[in-house]
Image (cartoon, helix red, strand yellow):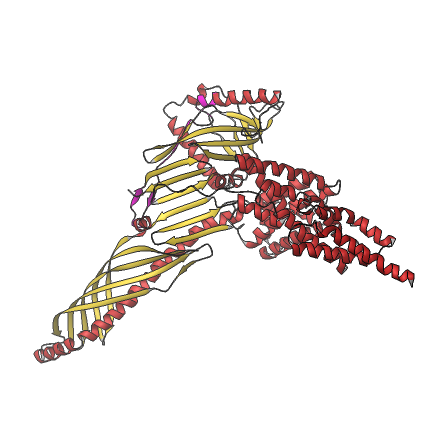
Amino acid sequence: MRQAVQYFLIPCFAAWLLSATVEQTCAGNPDNVAQLRSALAELDTWIGPESNGDKWRTFLKTDSLLKLISEGNAADPAEVAAVLQQYRSGANGLDKLRFVAVRRALEKWLIELQLQFSDDPAKLVWAVRGDHVPVSDERFANVRSKLHNQARALEKMLGKGSKLASGWKRYLHWELLEPHFQDDVVINRQSLQNLDRVLKRFRADHAGLEMPEFTRCADALADYRELAFWYALATRRDTRPIYRSSMDKLGQQLTRHAEGPTVETARLLGKSLGLIWRLDHSPQVVQALRDQLAQPNFFAHISEPVLQQLGERPVTESQLVRDVILGAQVRGNAMTHGFVSIQTIPAKDHIEIEVQLSGEIHSKTTGFKKPVCVSSKGHTCFIATKRLRIDDDQFELLPTEASASTHTQIGSICKTGGKFGRRLIERIAHKKVYESKAQSERIASKHAKRKVKAKFDRQISQAIHEAREKYDDKFRAPLLRNGMFPEHLLFATNEDSVSVEATVASHQQISANSPPPEVTSPSDLTMRLHESAVNNFLPVVLGGAGLRQDIASEPPRLEGDIPAWVKEISEKQQLDKQAAEGSDPGTAEKREFKPWYFKFNNEHPASISFDDGQLTLRLRIAELKASFDEEERPLTNWDFLIVYDVVQENDGIVLRRAGEIEALPTGFDPRWDKKLSGEQVGIRNNLAKNLNKRSEEGEGFPKEITVPPLKISSAAGTEYAFLLQDLVCADGWLTIGYRLP
C-alpha cells in the first residue's frame, strides 16, 4: 500500500513542480502557454519516474525546455526549435497522444516567439535560424516521386514514344533528367549541373512551354534541384550549422537593406528567402518578410482621353440594301456615317470599358410589290454599346445593347406592267403606303437594329479576339514559360482612366520595399517602374549568355539560350552602328583589335539601379577572356559598372555616361564593402583602364544612349508622338509621364 501511494504521489509532485516552475515566468499568449504547461505536465506524469521516463526526458531535452519556459519571451527560438525537432524526430512512440500534444503546444509557442519580431526583419530571421530540419530520405523520395509523376504526365500529354515526344525530349536534355527518377541516383556537382541545364531549357522562351504540363514539371524540377543539393549535403555533414550561417548572413543583409538598399542586398535577400521557401521552412516568416520586401514594383496609368484618341474613329461605309418589309422587296443603297467612342467604367479588379458606335444611315431604296413600286429615302439614327471586361483570366464581352429609329420620305409610287388602270392603282397604292408608313418604319427600325447589332458584335468580337491573342503571345505565355508570371497582377478602371499594377518577382527574388512615388503632375500616360522589376527579369534574358567578337570586321555576337527578340535587338543595334560608321569603312581596321569573349553570370547577369537622376548598369561577368590565347587563364567573377545620367531632351530620353567605367569583384557592394585584396586592386585597375580605353575609341559601352519619343498608332491609322512631361529617377524608382499632343 505504501509503495502504491509513493507511485501515485511522486508523479503528482513532479507535475506540480513543473507547473510551478513555469506558472509565474512563462510569457506570451496565456492560452498557448497554458496548453504547453498542461501537456508537458501530463506527459511527465504519464512517462513516470522510472529509468525509461528519464530516458525520454533526456531525449526530449525536458530540462532545456523547462529553462526556456522560465525565460519567457526572452527564450531563444532556435533552442526551442531544437527541442521541437526532437518531438518531430519520428522516434518510435512519439506518435502517442501525449507526445503529440506537447509537440503541438511547442509549435504554437515557437511561432509566437518568432512573430514577436515581425516588425524587425533582422531579428525575425535570427528567430527562425533554428527551423532547419536536414532533408531526410523520406522527404527526398517524396520530392523525387513528385518530379517523376509530373514527368510522366508530360510524357503522356506529348504521346509517349511519339515523334513529338522525342523532339521535345531532345530539346529538354531529357537524358540528363532520367537518372534522377531512379532510387539509386547519385547527387554530385555534375548531376546538379545537369539539372540546371534541363531547368534552363524548361524556362526558355520557346513556344509550347507555357502549357500546364510543362510548367508543372518545371516547378517540380526546381523544387527537386534545391532539395537534392541539401539532401546530398546532409549525407556528409550536419546541415543545421550551415543553415544557421546562411540565416545570420540574411539578417546582416536585412539590416543593410533597411539602412541603404542596393541591388546587391536585394539580390542576396531574394536568394536567401527563396532558400527558406524551397526548403519549406518558417512559412509564416517568409510571408511576413515578403509583405515588407515584395510590394508591387510596376504601375501604369492610362487616361481615358488616351484610350479615346487611340480607339475612337469615324466609320463610313456604303452597302447594298436587300430587305423585305410588309411583303415588299426593298432594294437600294445605303451610306453609314458613324463614330466609335470609348468610355471607362469604374471597376476594382478588372478593366471595364464601354465601346459605343453611334451614327446615321442614309438610304435610297425602291420597294417592289405587285403591281407597284415605291421609291423612298430613309434616315436611320442608331446607337450600339458593348461592355468589355478584361483581366488576366479572360477578355469577356457582355451582350450588345442597340437601338435604331428609321424615318422615311416617300418619293414616287408607280404602277408596273403597263398603263392599264395606272391612275386608279397608283391612287389606291398611295393611300395604302401612307397608311402603313408608320408600321413600315417600325419594321425598318427593327431590322436596322438587328443588322447594326450583328455587325458591331462581329467587329468587336474580332478585335477582342485579336487583342487576347496578342496578350497571350506577347505577355502571358512568355512569362509563364520563364516562371516569372506575376503572382500579383491587378487591373482596374475608374471614371477617367485605366490602371495596372504588378509584382514582377519569382519566389527567389524580392521586389520593392517602398510604395511608388506620388505623381506630382498628372499625365495622360504614366509608368512607375522599380529597379527590381527590371533586375528580376534580366536572368531570363541574359542568364548564362555569352558575347564575343572574333575579328574586327564582324560585329560582336550573342551566344547561348537567349530569347529570339534579344538577338534581334542586338543585331539591329550592330547594323545601326555599322551604318553610322559607313562614311569611314576603315574605322574598324584603324583600331588595334584583339578577340575577346565574356559570359554573363547565370543567376544574376546584370542589374540596374535608379538614384539621384542616374541609372547605374552593373554587368556580372562569370568568365572573361581578352584574347584567344589557349594558355591565357580567363578572369572569373568580375562586374562592370557604368553610370548614366538620365536626362530629357525634347520628348525623348537620353542616357549620357557619367564618369569612368568601373570594375569590381562579383558580389562586392560599394555601399557596404570597403576592402579589396592587393590582387583584386591590380585586376580592377587593369580592367577599368582597358574598358575606358575601348570606350574612348568608340568600342564597348556607348557614351550616349537615346530613347526615342513614344509613338503610338490609333485604330484609325494616325500616329501620335506623346509629349514627355515628367521624368524622375530616384530612390529606386523611375517615373515617366507623357501627355497627349
Magenta stretch encompasses residue 208: no
Q: Residue at x 45, y 57 (%)?
A: 394
Towards the viewer: 62 or 244: 62
Magenta stretch encompasses residue 694: yes
Q: Where is residue 613, by image quadrant?
A: top left
Towards the viewer: 148 or 342: 342
Q: In this view, does 148 lie to the left or right of 361?
A: right
Q: Which x, y percent locates residue 719?
A: 30, 44
> From which residue to which does the magenta span run?
693-722
576 over 134 or under it: above or below: above
Q: In this view, does 30 lie to the left or right of 473?
A: right
Q: Is residue 221 left or right of residue 554?
A: right
Q: Residue at x 32, y 33 (%)?
A: 650
Q: Which residue is drawn at 27% across and 62% down?
A: 383
Q: Which x, y percent locates residue 324?
A: 24, 72
Towards the viewer: 250 or 539: 250
391 over 559 or under it: above or below: below
Residue that protrudes farthest toward the left in the picture: 423
